[in-house]
Amino acid sequence: MPEPKIITASREASMNYMNETLPVKESFDIIQRDMLIGGRMATFYFIDGFTKDEVMLKIMDSMFKVTEETMPADATQFARMCIPYVEVDVLGDFDQVLKNVLSGVTCLFIDGYESCIAIDCRTYPARSVEEPDKDKSLRGSRDGFVETIVFNTALLRRRIRDPHLTMQMLEVGESSRTDVAICYMSDRVDQKLLQTVSERIKNIQTNDLRMNQQTLAECMFKRKWYNPFPKFKFTERPDTAAACLFEGKVIILVDNSPSAMILPTSVLDIIEEANDYYFPTLTSVYLKFSRVLINLMTIFLTPLFLLFMQNLNWLPKIFAFVAVKDTVNIPLIFQLLMLEIAIDGLRLAALNTPSMLSTPLSVIAGLVMGEFSVKSGWFNSEVMLYMAFVAVANYTQPNFELGYALKFMRLQLLILTALFNWAGFAAGCLVILLSFCFNKTLSGRNYLNIKLN
């Protein structure tokens, strides 16, 4: 790695290097501002749109009051005596200067000073701190993480006023140079896990984090493509993240991402939601048990239905009413697979439909796929009922990735059952069990929190 270029006392040399490295003339938003301070020429570099105009106006007004007689001897004294602002730093090499300028920090070169003065009066465009749409709570706070990492760390600091709360800032990506914060309680965290997480992030060799946390997760722990179960838990709620910190977990925040990554992860962590923290113990245990039961039903309901329809003599008389009574024009397995794809099509259509049209689209889709598809003979009413339950049940847990993992398990179970009858169903159940038990996470443990070699 080449040695960083050191700043010299020549402002002209610094200007030449900055103008050669940055597209000052080509990019309208990279501003170079020359002025006279204390009888010396000075040059500001900053990004238009990132600087607080009112703050910079007051800082410049203070600088203009400096005379040649009161001009400090070096940059460190100038930063202490002449800049009435909190976040001021003195930089010694151009690599730090370029990083700060491109991050929105205002950098000042003064003739005769062998350092650059960085004034962090930046502000980022940000939306309001509001409750996330995906992870809502019946009780509790109504705030949520946003895309600015400093705001997100402040939301955690507001809840945890403990000196043991540590937030370690790292930088990932040669081009993007994305800020990544590792948050933990130093007196409660698993030190071995913390060391593993820190080393993996520091050793990431990538050009950029183009998909923010997802890219970071893939770089930290490369998953096996054939096991779809998630290895990380994400939350957009600062109260949930704070509760996990108190439990000794590690929280990873990535700039430009409105969610927190929680480590380590087990199956109980994945199926948790915010309401579990706000209700009494008995209620929260019941809700968690209900989610587990419903998730199991989303996997096994339609494969069991298909298995019994292929072996009607196995069906107990008390459940004889579930048998398909109408004419089956299309084999049940093809009906189930078609509906699996159709449900995903409706979900994608809802995501890309303007909010004002989402209700009419839902009504049309419900009528066409519900009543008319049964009457036309494409689908049987029993198949439509069970697939409707599966589609709704997928939303009983907040983890979107887990929902698709359960879907893939259900699909392979359906196909194996259709091809090999009961033997295929048993083999599919074994595949699900093995995928679940041997899903190794970053902590070296599986979903049952059992240590794997």
Image (cartoon, rainbow, N blue to C red):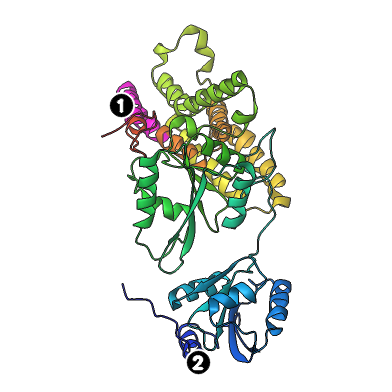
Left or right for 435, reference 402: left
Quarter of the rendering containing residue 241: top right
* On-image quarter of the N terminus: bottom left
Q: Is residue 407 above or below residue 347?
A: above
Q: CA distance from mark 2 to mark 1?
A: 74 Å
x%, y% of residue 128?
70, 54
Residue 322 seen in the current view:
yes
Task: Tell me the number on the disc at residue 427.
Answer: 1
Farthest residue, direction top: 317
Q: Nearer the viewer, residue 265 or 100?
A: 100
What secondary structure is the stretch in magenta mostly built from?
A: helix
Is residue 55 covered in magenta? no
Quick one: 254 or 296, which is closer to the camera?
254
Residue 435, image x, y percentages: 34, 33
Residue under label 2: 12
Using the image, determine if residue 101 lies above or below residue 259.
Answer: below
Q: Residue at the spot x=58%, y=86% of the render? A: 43
Mark positioned earlier in the residue sequence (2 or 1): 2
Front one among 122 and 162? 162
The magenta-colored residue range is 411-434
